[in-house]
Image (cartoon, rainbow, N blue to C red):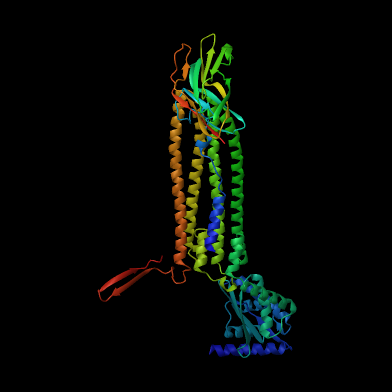
Amino acid sequence: MLIPKYKLILSLIFLASLLLGRNSLYSIAVLDFVPQGVTPELAGTLTDHFAVELNNTNTMRMVNRNRMSRIFNDKGFEQTGCDSIDCAVIAGYMLGVEQMIVGSIWKLDTTYTIDVHIISVQYGKTLRSNRITYEGEMDGLIEQMKLLPWNLIGMEPPERLAKKERIREYTLMIEEEKTKGGALFRSLLLPGFGQFYSGKKISAFSYVSAELAFIVMAMSRQSNFLSLQSDQESIRTLYDASTVQEDINNYSAQLISLNNKIKNANSQLMLYTASAAGIWALNVIHALVLDPSFDARAKKTQGSALARSLLMPGFGQLYTGRKTAGYTFIGLELAFIGLTVNSYSNSRSLKADQEKIQASYLAATTQEDISAYSEQLVDLDKKIKAANNLTSLFTVSAIAVWGLNVAHAFIMGTGDDNDVTTVPLTLAYDPLSKQTQIQWTVHF
Amino acid sequence: MKNLSGILLILLVLGCENETSDLDDILTNPLDENQVTYDVPAFIFNPSQYNADLVNTFSAEVFAMGVENLVGANALIQFDPAKLSLVNVKNGELASGTGGSTPMFFFQDSIPGLVEIVAVYLSSDSVGISGNIKIAELVFSAASAGESELEFLPECEMLDPDDNPIEIMGYANGVVNVQ
């Protein structure tokens, strides 16, 4: 019996407010849209944009939103989550308005859905409704929120809003025309351009940066190679012209050292060139896997996971939401790369020592010195071999982790079919064997 | 399309590799004890290979390599007279008169395809010289195209201050390629 009394009091308040504040325009108030998958702050901001634009239509008399909040606070009314007719009616009675606007904002992946209803406070009915679905940047969403009041009340939006909407629709139309072939062609032409075309700006800049970095490093190595080769030619002339054993030994040591440096420079040139080519190939594969059409952007696919894991270990897993696996792969890969670099650096340092001692060994004339240097060279040779073995081991491990990560990303796919968050244990009584059985399901 | 891209990438990578020489191809000084395969003391030609033509002459230096206390050398060198012609024989370091020694150098080339060189280091203290010593420089001209050899004969000799022979442990003949 409490509810009819409550309704009666509210009706009296409503009638009183109508008599006191009678105007030719409907009085209306906009409640904060209910956030679903977005922050309450964002929902509040979007509601503000909606309310301001609704006021610009000059078709309704709006209750100031600050005043509305004060009234709700005074009466202890919590407007959070209020998007039903009953709730709107109660709020409307409290504010003394004829109509209420309630709504909700949903976000799923990158798609926003906004529902808006005009509720008649007096009749407790929905007068008008509108729903928009939007996918894209925040600026566009705000524009949609501004267009929404006009559409809701059935009026043509002003030119300033209509023009922006036409541009957006045109952009969408162009984006929808984008094809895999277009992305592939562009990525073949220049790394990153296919991704840029497909709207993957971070990937695009990553490819361009990586490609440029490897090309610059390769050019630097080539320049170093040519400089060393020139030095080698000069010293070789001196070596060939030498007849004194001491000079011969001296120039020979320099030639050995230079030859090692030349081979290193050449190996590095090959490595950087191969890396640049690899980036190029990855960029082409990535562009091929990407679906540049607008609809496919938000869709997580097995191909995208694979491309990401090919690009960087763990990225495919992070993309599909397997954070533990993602961070594990990233950690393992970084660890092995770090160990490889450390072993390689150690090997280079030992080689430099070996070259110095080799020069002393070749220049030595007494048997005592020769024996001492010889022992050091043998010892260093063992250490270099050990360091090289470690470098090989860590490199292979890094490659294996990379391969495993790719296989994992490919096999696991987007993970829509597997609920990996559930406990993979099933406990059941088997009436045939009259035993309780436990089943363990492994997701891989 | 994919295959073509793959091939292009491989060609791109391979095309960027520079040619590098092996140390064996660089360290070719015939006087380099650490690289040569013959033992010392030895009679050698420096350089060991000659690329000549039919127009210009070329010089072949005869060295006593890795000797100790050498005072005299007698080198007999054989070559193909149909392909090479001896133009001149120049004195080297052993009999150059350095260190107050008396120069004594002569050669005999009356037999076609054979030259005998005698160089003696005659010093007042009767001490020889050590190391790599140029005995003589042979100037040749090419008579016809093809490959031939400048060959040391086993009758070659090295002598110490007491006129005792120094055992010659190796010979390195020269190779001439006329184009």
Q: Is residue B36 above or below residue A28?
A: above
Q: Which quarter of the rendered picture does the C terminus of chain B lie within? A: top right
Number of numbered discs visible in the structure rendering: 0
Expressed as whole percent of the image width and height from the top left, the position of residue A66 reads: 68, 75
Residue furthest top as drawn = B124
Residue drawn at (58%, 85%) of the image? A85
Within the image, what quadrant is residue A37 found in? bottom right
Q: Is residue B27 visible?
A: no
Residue closer to the observer: A319 or A260: A260
Name which quarter of the figure residue A440 lies in. bottom left
Asked if residue A282 can be seen in this view, the reply is: yes
Q: Is residue B122 above or below residue A266?
A: above
Q: Residue B31, position in %: x, y?
A: 51, 27
Quarter of the figure that contains the N terminus of chain B:
bottom right
Percent from the top left, x then y, of residue B6?
Answer: 53, 59
Q: Is residue B19 above or below residue A415?
A: above
